[in-house]
Image: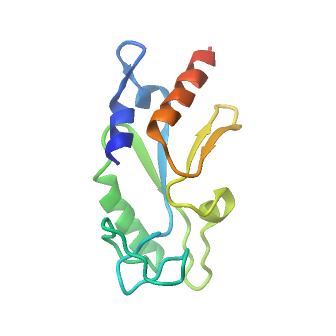
Amino acid sequence: MPALNELAEKTYAGSETYADRVHIVHIYVIEPHPKSPDVSPYTGTVWEGEYSSKHQPLTYAERLAAARDTKLLLEGNQLILIDDLVPGDDNNPVWCTYGPCPNCAYLIRQDGIVDTVETWLDVAAMQSKIDALLQQAP
C-alpha cells in the first residue's frame, strides 16, 4: 500500500496528482496468505507470510469487513471494490476472469482496452506506463 499511496499522491504535470488523472481501483479478492489454520488457495496448505493478518473470509460480509480494514490503509483518491463471494460456490468472478493473483495490476484505457498487465505490481514500471498513456490522451 505505501507504494500505491505514494503513486496516488504523486504530482503529475503541475498541480494534479496521478489520482486526479487516473482511477486507482483495488479489488479485494481472496486472501493469498491467510492466517493459520486457514489454507492458501494457491497451495492448499497453510502458507502464512509475515504480513498475514487476516483469515480467509467465508462470506461476503466477512470479505466486506476485511476490505473496510484495507481501505483504512489507502491514502488519496483510491477506490476499493469487492469481488463477489457466494458461500459454497467459490464465486470470485474478477479473480477468476482476470487472473488468479492477489497483486496483479491492470492499466485500462478509457475505451476499455487493457493497455498493461502486471502479474506482480511494479509501481515504477506502472508509473512509466501511466505517463506514456497520459501523454497520448487529448
Residue 58 lies, in percent from the top left, at: 46, 80
Q: Is residue 71 above or below residue 54?
A: above
- Of residues 47 and 19, the one nearer the viewer is 47
Q: Quadrant of residue 38?
A: bottom left
Q: Quadrant of the C terminus?
A: top right
Q: Residue at x 36, y 67 (%)?
A: 66
Q: Quadrant of residue 133?
A: top right
Q: Is residue 88 above or below residue 12?
A: below
What is the total number of numbered labels drawn onto the structure image?
0
- Of residues 103 and 80, the one nearer the viewer is 103
Residue 9 lies, in percent from the top left, at: 33, 31
Residue 41 lies, in percent from the top left, at: 54, 76
Q: Is residue 133 above or below residue 95?
A: above
Left or right: where 98 falls relative to 18: right
Q: Is residue 76 above or below residue 67?
A: above
Q: Residue at x 57, y 29 (%)?
A: 129
Q: How is the image coloured?
A: rainbow
Q: Residue at x 31, y 44 (%)?
A: 2
Q: Quadrant of residue 42?
A: bottom right
Left or right: where 82 falls relative to 72: right
Residue 61 lies, in percent from the top left, at: 42, 73
